[in-house]
């Protein structure tokens, strides 16, 4: 168990390391995108935001691109007259007009007159260092500047939105945040980054570990009003819609396919950049934020998942563990979804990997435990039962029941003749060595003929055929074993004679009939054995082997083997412990 717990902790750390390296991002992003498409957090409506789109219609009507700056001047004038709260251009005016200086001055004048214009700025890399690209000074002197470079995930999707950055001791505000501050008339100096969140007045915007905000997209942009640039700059537009822009945030940007200013997002694989800004602003204004767990929290989640599932599987078993894992996976997905509805996104892939890995580890440990137990049991049984019988028990073919069971068996006793005299004047080491040598030979013959070694009783061996596994030819096997025992001992006697060692012999007695077989003994210690009159008879017949008979069998054994072996009638004999005489036979 301790080894398994240690391995499970190692697995948890490895999974967390893989998570930190982004191994599970594909699944997590798929799940997040699915939530974004199917679960709308907060209100879809973005009534306070209007997008003036440089769309295909506008390009078709103007017949010219880039637009003369006078067109942008006309737009700012219309929006300013219409009472727009903020006019924000998702267009970088970093170069002078290609038409005339007058065009630039017209646009600059309208920017200054409006006093609420936000212009885009971005950065590029020069010699490995970021360089900020600003609008020309003529425009930037009277406008508020905001960064527009997007945060792309590895799959090029935009799920997150950077709010601020730092460059050369300057705090750079990004488009959505700058527009929000201007609209709400909040000073940038009042902002603070506190504990992975951006605090603005009484609101706190959660930031991820990269300092970005997860965008709560409005599915398919149903909540944002989009109006063509070409319509807005027409003189009659404001006359017909005098309050259309009043107190609204107006974003100006491209939606035309020709201009290719679009990116894949969870809800739209081809979303114009200006609409991404609109969704980021909506997320801030609606306070419908999506927060994520601290990175280190996943370490504890993974450790908890691995340990709990591993212990469940090991302690309850693989089947119950499997049911528990299935339930845990289903409940995890449900809980994570419910938590997302409440504005917290949990990356689930590493938790699923932890649960599955822990179950597989527990399953493997259970397998090793069963295998080791089978090996141990097999090793123990092989000291008493022939290997083929052991295999049947281990494989489940046979069942050794606790309760006693009636069996028809043959019981064999093999006793060393003259062993008491042999022990009298010899050192213990020699006695034990020669005793073990002859008992080894006798035991090998028992196993060779598929018998069960029941026990050793001093210098005597007891073996059984027909229990614990039923054997129809139990008597034949027992007698064959007795005959080969005598041959094997004869070979030992020749060896002892050459060494000058004392010569020992063995007498074998066999009785057949019905016995009770089962685990018999005390509560704390039991021994699988057989009991009954057949056992007593086989033991009592042993005395006849001192009268010149090597192998003595009872009446029932004789009836079962007389067609195979020559049986010599000894007669009805009186034996110790039996009131009635026993019919005894010798194997010739």
Image: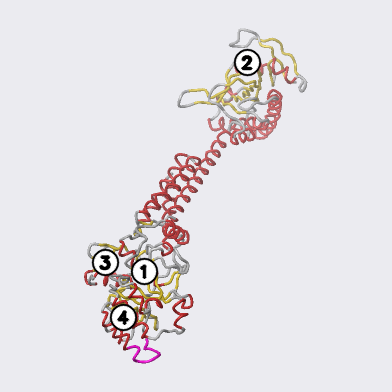
Are there few (<14), some (14-19), or many (20+) residues within 10 Å of tag 3? some
Are there few (<14), some (14-19), or many (20+) residues within 10 Å of tag 2? many
| Magenta-drawn segment | 95-104
Are there few (<14), some (14-19), or many (20+) residues within 10 Å of tag 1? many
What mark, if any, has residue 104 been given in the picture? none
- Nearer-N-terminus badge (4/1): 4
Marks 3 and 1 sit apart, C-alpha to C-alpha, by 23 Å
Q: Which residue is mark 4?
A: 77
Between label 1 and label 2, give the one nearer the viewer. Answer: 1
**Residue 375, percent from left and from top:** 55, 39
Marks 1 and 2 sit apart, C-alpha to C-alpha, by 101 Å
Q: Which residue is mark 2?
A: 537
Between label 4 and label 1, give the one nearer the viewer. Answer: 4
207 relative position to 447: left or right: left
Q: Which residue is mark 1?
A: 278
- Nearer-N-terminus badge (4/3): 4
Q: Are marks 4 and 2 in contact (CB under 8 Å)?
A: no
Q: Is residue 404 above or below residue 213?
A: above
What mark, if any, has residue 193 been given in the picture? 3
Q: Main secondary structure of the magenta part?
A: loop
């Amino acid at each position: 168990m301790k080894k398994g717990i240690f391995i499970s902790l190692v697995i948890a750390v490895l999974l967390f390391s893989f998570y930190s390296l982004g191994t599970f991002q594909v699944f997590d992003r798929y799940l997040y995108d699915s939530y974004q498409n199917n679960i709308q957090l907060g209100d879809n409506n973005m009534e306070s935001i209007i997008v003036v789109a440089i769309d295909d219609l506008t390009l078709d009507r103007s017949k010219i691109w880039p637009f003369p700056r006078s067109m942008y001047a006309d737009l700012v004038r219309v929006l300013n007259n219409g009472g727009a709260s903020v006019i924000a251009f998702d267009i970088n005016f970093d170069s002078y007009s290609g038409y005339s200086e007058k065009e630039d001055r017209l646009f600059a004048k309208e920017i200054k007159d409006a006093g609420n214009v936000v212009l885009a700025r971005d950065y590029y890399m020069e010699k490995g260092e970021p360089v900020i690209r600003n609008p020309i000074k003529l425009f930037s002197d009277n406008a508020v500047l905001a960064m527009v470079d997007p945060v792309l995930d590895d799959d090029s999707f935009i799920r997150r939105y950077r709010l601020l950055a730092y460059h050369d001791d300057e705090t750079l505000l990004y488009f959505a945040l700058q527009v929000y501050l201007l609209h709400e008339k909040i000073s940038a100096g009042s902002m603070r980054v506190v504990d992975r969140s951006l605090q603005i007045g009484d609101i706190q915007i959660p930031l991820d570990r990269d300092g970005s905000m997860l965008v709560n997209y409005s599915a398919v942009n149903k909540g944002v009003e989009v109006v063509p640039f070409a319509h807005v700059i027409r003189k009659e537009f404001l006359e017909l819609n005098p309050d259309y822009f009043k107190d609204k945030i107006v974003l100006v940007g491209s939606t035309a396919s020709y201009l290719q200013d679009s990116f894949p997002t969870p809800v739209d694989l081809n979303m114009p950049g200006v609409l991404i800004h609109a969704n980021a602003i909506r997320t801030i204004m609606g306070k419908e934020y999506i927060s994520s767990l601290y990175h280190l929290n996943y370490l504890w989640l993974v450790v908890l998942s691995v340990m709990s599932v591993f212990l469940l599987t090991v302690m309850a078993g693989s089947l119950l563990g499997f049911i528990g894992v299935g339930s845990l996976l289903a409940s995890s997905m449900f809980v994570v979804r419910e938590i997302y509805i409440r504005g917290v996104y949990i990356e689930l892939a590493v938790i699923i990997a932890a649960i599955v890995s822990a179950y597989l580890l527990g399953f493997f440990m259970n397998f090793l435990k069963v295998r080791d137990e089978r090996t141990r049991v097999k090793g123990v049984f092989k000291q008493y039962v022939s290997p083929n019988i052991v295999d049947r028990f281990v494989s489940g073919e046979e069942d050794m029941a606790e309760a006693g069971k009636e069996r028809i068996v043959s019981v064999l006793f093999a006793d060393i003749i003259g062993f008491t005299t042999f022990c009298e004047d010899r050192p213990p080491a020699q006695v034990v060595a020669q005793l073990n040598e002859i008992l080894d030979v006798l035991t090998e013959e028992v196993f060779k003929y598929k018998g069960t070694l029941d026990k050793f009783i001093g210098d005597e061996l007891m073996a059984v055929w027909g229990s614990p596994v039923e054997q129809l030819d139990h008597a034949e096997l027992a007698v064959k074993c007795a005959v080969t025992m005598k041959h094997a001992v004869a070979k030992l006697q020749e060896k002892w004679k050459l060494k000058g060692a004392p010569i020992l012999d063995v007498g074998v007695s066999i009785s057949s009939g019905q016995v009770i077989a089962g685990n018999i003994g005390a509560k704390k210690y039991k021994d699988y054995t057989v009991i009954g009159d057949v056992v007593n008879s086989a033991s009592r017949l042993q005395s006849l082997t001192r009268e010149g008979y090597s192998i003595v069998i009872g009446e029932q054994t004789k009836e079962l083997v007389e067609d195979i072996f020559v049986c010599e009638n000894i007669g009805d004999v009186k034996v110790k412990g039996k009131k009635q005489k026993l019919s005894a036979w010798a194997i010739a």
